Amino acid sequence: MLHPYLQITAMDKKIKNLGTQSNKLLLFGGVYSNLQALEALIETAHILNIPAENCICTGDLIGYCAQPEETVQLLKKWGAHSILGNVEIQLNEGQENCGCNFTEGSRCDVFSSQWYPYAQKKLSTNSLAFLRTLPNNLQFKYANKNISVVHGAYDQVSEFIFKSTPWSVKSKNFKASKSDFIIAGHCGLPFSETHKDKTWLNPGAIGMPANDGSPKVWYATLEIKEKKIQISQHNLDYNYKLAIALMKEAQLPLTYANTLQTGIWDNMEILPAAEKLLQGKTIKF
């Protein structure tokens, strides 16, 4: 059984190197079985003329919403890059929970005991086989920067890292991954932070809103401008009403269905104090 934080040692890591990249990149994470959001993101990529091979997911394809099987199959068909989130690792290992390290008995812990078994039941052997092909991390060069894509943190897949997380915590990840720039997911909130020559970017999640009072979800793009990396973070509109209807039909937790509409999280037990104060406030970059 894996450590609650899903620690992955260097020997156990599966790292895929994408070489040197120079074109515009689309970054996203936290799809959470939200097929409608993924469909909207793919359409956005087409509009932006960003091919699948330049699109990168930070993991947690599976989660709270009603279509885990369809979501995995669409990502597979699309051909975008993805790493393993803690949910995919747990599903691959046949574990009994999502591995998010929620406090036992908390609302998130109780709700995960509903949506996680649902996802286990719905996923086909073909989808599970596809998930087993995904790496733990991606690495590539971009504007002469060494980039690493992680889920939560480099060594602890389920570690929640937010903008308010001390830089000393983030800095350990740059050293461990030998990176200048880290693209991460897991926490569900979009942000970027640069300290001297190092940058931490969370493009946000597309499967659930960012606790900002809007049903819109978040993704990011990277471009090279004047030999420097330019980060842009964007809202995404999608058919959240259909996603809600499907969740209700599947008898998944209503609180998560409500969040798709209100943009407000049911609880903030995972959030640091600084992020709690931002609930319902428009996110600005």
Image: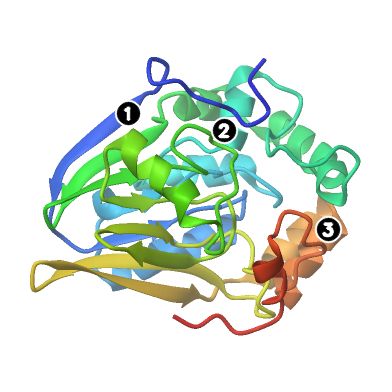
Q: Which residue is rendered at x = 44% and y = 45% of the image?
A: 75
Q: Is mark 2 on a helix, strand or loop?
A: helix
Instruction: Pick the residue in front: 61 or 137.
Output: 137
Dot 1: few (<14), some (14–19), or many (≥20) neighbours within 10 Å?
some
Q: Which residue is rendered at x = 27% and y = 38% of the image?
A: 178
33 is higher (above) or lower (below) than 7: below
Residue 181 at x, y = what percent? Answer: 29, 52
Applied colour scheme:
rainbow
Quadrant showing the N terminus: top right
Specify the quadrant of the image occupied by residue 7.
Answer: top right
Q: Which amino acid does label 1 sit on?
A: Ile
The residue beneath circle 3 is 248
Dot 3: few (<14), some (14–19), or many (≥20) neighbours within 10 Å?
some
Q: What element carries label 1?
A: strand
Label whose residue precedes the other's in the sequence (2 or 1): 1
Contact? badges 3 and 2 (CB < 8 Å): no
Q: Distance between the residues labelled 1 and 3?
A: 38 Å
Instruction: Pick the residue in front: 15 or 119.
Output: 15
The residue beneath circle 1 is 15
